[in-house]
Image: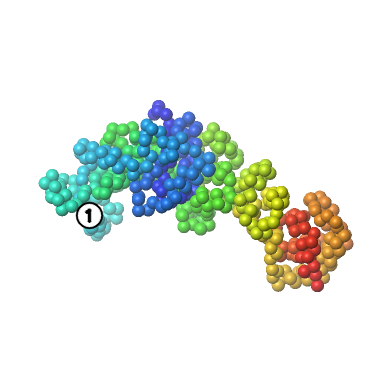
Amino acid sequence: MNKKVRVRYAPSPTGFLHIGGARSALFNYLYAKKFNGDFVFRIEDTDIERNIEGAEYSQLHDLIWLGIIPDESIENPNPKYKYYRQMEKLDIYKKYAYELVEKGYAYECFCSEEDLEKSRIEQEERGITSFKYDRRCLNLSEEEKEALRKKGIKPSIRLRVPDDKKIVFNDLVRGEVSFNSNDFGDFVILKSNGIPTYNFAVVIDDHIMDITHVLRGEEHLSNTPKQLFIYDYFGWEAPQFGHMTIIINENGKKLSKRDNNIVQFVSQYRKMGFLPQAILNFLLLLGWTPEDNKEIFTLSEMCSCFDPSRLSKSPSMFDNKKLYWMNSHYIKTLDNEKYFEFILPFIKENKNLANKTEDELKNISLVFKNEILYGEQINSFIDEVFNKAKLNDDQKAFVNSELSQRVLTFIEEKIKSTNDLKFDKDSFKAWINDVILNTQAKGKNLYMPIRLSLTGCEHGIEMYNIFNLLGKDEVLKRIREELQ
């Protein structure tokens, strides 16, 4: 195939951009850029009853937010191809469907859902578990068809699948793949309402848009032989197919939209405060392996080093911990101005910071730059410091112990004699060393009574940052509350 490489991502607007769809889009985009081709975004909107408001916008603009910017789309069409939504092309599908009828490769089918269900039950009673259409409409005469039309019955159109034919193709990911036509029966390509089925519409779309390569999930593998028959009947050159392996969760099960342990949609990650470059980087390694052990890639590096032969042949595990680690890495690498710009939308509504100036907000946010895994998380850290948690009975007993009280009493006196309770890591270390010398408390016996007195929590950010955030008066107030 010597044509210009053209690939596509063609979602249905029945839902927002899913993390699995984003992975498919990314690999298609990288394939196009690797070979100086075009990445096309189009919409498969024929499932009109399931289409939801806002889904089309999400599918496109969440991709753009990630940095996967289509060369052509519903908002940036190429005049040569004109239509980027399937519902705009119903006349085109009908024309091609009846062309196949005229050539004898398809036929009108007048069977109702009740007829098909009855046939399905009969086949099951004979031990046939995989339903195949019985071709009862294949040889209807013109008179019989006309009589059915007069009854108001509108026909669908079925593709006539040849018997006992082997279909072989070379998959970009899996190598040689073969099917036998006996595994499936004659299938509908145009429904009685004039709307095409997926396997027909996608062939017409890919052909008229000059798509050369199709990278998609393995759930479409069984659709490929059906589509190849359509290409063959029209005498068209088929694109080269590649079917990526499934994504599994940490329990080894196929990722499901009902899996509540994994955030599923890109819009959710945006809202939580994930950086697009972190999600892209994670998705790259979810089914593709670089030649070395490198884990961090810019988008331009992804485009230059992407090799489709290194797409995984085994299921890819969605590792939540790795995704969160990767996002925290990208947050840490932001310069302070970019970081504050990123984090400001998350902290400006925090009631604990209502009276803070922008400079104060910036200084507070920087305290948590190396702590947070995602933007939204900063508020839980802020709340943990500014809203002291209630101590449980065990914590109260620990704080009330003789050694803890000695530590808190000494710190109270020390704070009263300290003019500016502002620390960096080294100055706080020197300040706390004096507490150690005078109380003989170390480790947990030193730090835990202080931390519990200030935040009510046993873990959290470094102690000197807590002092800085609360200020002298509030620290002193909270220490005194725990003194007996």
Name the residue type under label 1. Answer: Ser
Side of 208 relative to 398 (left or right): left
Left or right side of 434 for 229: left
The residue that mark 1 highlights is 112
Q: Dividing the image into 4 quarters, which one contains the N terminus?
A: top left
Residue in the picture at 27% in, 36% down:
233
Counting from the top left corner in percent of width and height, residue 133 is at 24, 50
Which of these two is toward me, 179 or 300?
300
Identified at 54% across, 32% down, the residue is: 304
Residue 227 seen anywhere in this rendered image of the structure: no
**Residue lying at 49% horizontally and 48% vertically, measured from the top left:** 19
Q: Quadrant of residue 160?
A: top left
Residue 159 appearing in the image: yes
Q: Is residue 440 left or right of residue 169?
A: right
The residue located at (49%, 57%) in the rendering is 259
* Front in this rendered view, residue 113 or 176: 113
Counting other residues with Cα less than 10 Å from the Cα at mark 1, is it few (<14), some (14-19), or many (20 or more)?
some
